[in-house]
Image (spheres, rainbow, N blue to C red):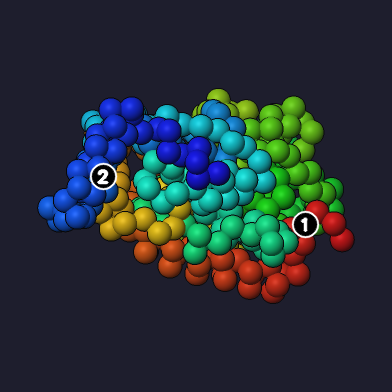
Amino acid sequence: MQTAARPRRTLTAALTAAGLALSLSACGGVTDGTDDTDGFPDGPITLTVGQDAGGSTDLIARAVANGSQDSLGVAMPVENQPGANGAIATQQVADQSPDGYDLVLLNASLITITSLIAAEDEEVDLDELDVLMGLSRDDYVMVAHADTGYETLEDVAADSGDVSYGTAGIGTGSQLAQLLLFGEADIEGNEVPFDGGGPALTALMGGQVDVATVQVAEAMPQIEAGTVNPVVVFSDERLDFLPETPTALEEGYDIPVAQYRAVAMPAGASDEVKATLEDGFQEIVGTEEYQQFNEDNYLTPVEISGDEVEEQWNELAETYRQLVEDNDINLGGTE
C-alpha cells in the first residue's frame, strides 16, 4: 500500500530529487547537511476519516483541512473510508509510509471502547501510529422523546422494564454510556443499536425508542426545537449550552464517557516531519475560524500533545475495561 502514497509528490519535485541524487553520486555522496525532509510538504496531504461524510468526525476533519493551505502551504483533501468504527481507515493509514502525506482523524472510541469487543488481531494499536495532537471532546447526552414525559432520570427509572433505548451502535461511546448508566441505576430496558447517532436520534423522534444517548451536537437542534428532552449529560461538569441538565455524576453515577478526537500518522516519521505537522495544526486550531467552528458545534477544545493524547486514551481504555467488568456489561450485542 505504500506505493499509493508516493505519487502525491509533484513531477517537478520528483525530477529535482532525481537530479540531486545524480549530483551527489558524482560527488561521492557528500551532502550539504540537509535531508530528504527539506521542503516538506511539497504536495497535498490526505486526511482520512473512518466515518461517513456529514458526521461530527467528518466535520472536524474538514474544519482542520480548511486551514491547511494557510498553515502548511498545501491542500489537505479529506477522504471518507467508513467501516468498523474507523478501524479500516485507521489501519489503512497506519500501513502507509510515515512521510507525512497520509494522516487520519482518529476517534478515541476506536482505541478505548471498540478494543473491548474486537478480536485481538483486529484491534488498532496506538503503537502503529504517531499521534500529532489532540483536537476536541464531544460530550454525550441522554435524551427522551417529548411525548414520554421523561424529564429526569427518576422519570425513566419509574418505567424500568418497559423502557426502550437507542444507541449509536455496538462498541461506541453512546452504547457504553447508556449501558453503564442503566446498569448502575438498576434500570432495565431493551437496547436498540443503530448505525450512528443520527439514525438513533431519528428513531427516537419517530417513537421507535423512548430514550437515546447521542452526541450533544447531534441532539441540540431537536432539544432547542422541543422535540426531545435532555435528561442527563455525561460530561464532568454541566455544559454551558445545557445549564439546566444535570450530569450523571450529579445523579450519583461516575461515568466518564466522551468522544475525543486527534490527528495521527503512521509511526516512524522523522522529527522534522512531525514538527512541521504539529506546528501546522497548532496554527490551524488557533485561528478564529476554527475556534468558532468548535463553538458552533458544541465541541470542547482538548488541544494537547500527541504524548498526552496517548496517555489519556490508554488510561480511559483501562477505566472503561474495569467499568464493563464491574457492571457485567455486554457490549457485543449477544448474551
The quarter of the rendered structure image containing the N terminus is top right
The answer to whether 220 appears left or right of 163 in the picture is left
How far across and down, in percent of the image, does residue 217 sit? 50, 36
Amino acid carrying mark 1 in the image: Gly
How far across and down, in percent of the image, does residue 300 sit? 39, 46
Which label number is shown at residue 21? 2
Q: How many marks?
A: 2
In the foreground, 316 or 161: 316
Residue shown at 66% from the left, 41% from the top = 83
Is label 2 in a helix, a strand or a loop?
A: helix
In the foreground, 305 or 72: 72
Camera sees residue 67: no
Query: Dot 1 corresponds to which residue?
Result: 332
Amino acid carrying mark 2 in the image: Ala
Vertical arrangement, residue 183 with respect to residue 74, above or below: below
How far across and down, in percent of the image, does residue 46 sit? 43, 36
Residue shown at 70% from the left, 45% from the top = 169
> How busy is the neighbourhood of tag 2: few (under 14 within 10 Å), some, or many (20 plus)?
some
The answer to whether 286 appears left or right of 212 in the picture is left
The quarter of the rendered structure image containing the C terminus is bottom right
Vertical arrangement, residue 324 with respect to residue 55, above or below: below
How far across and down, in percent of the image, does residue 334 sit? 85, 57
Vertical arrangement, residue 277 with respect to residue 176, above or below: above
Is label 1 in a helix, a strand or a loop?
A: loop
Q: Are marks 1 and 2 in contact (CB under 8 Å)?
A: no
Label located before the other in sequence (1 or 2) = 2
**Spatial CA span between label 1 and label 2:** 54 Å
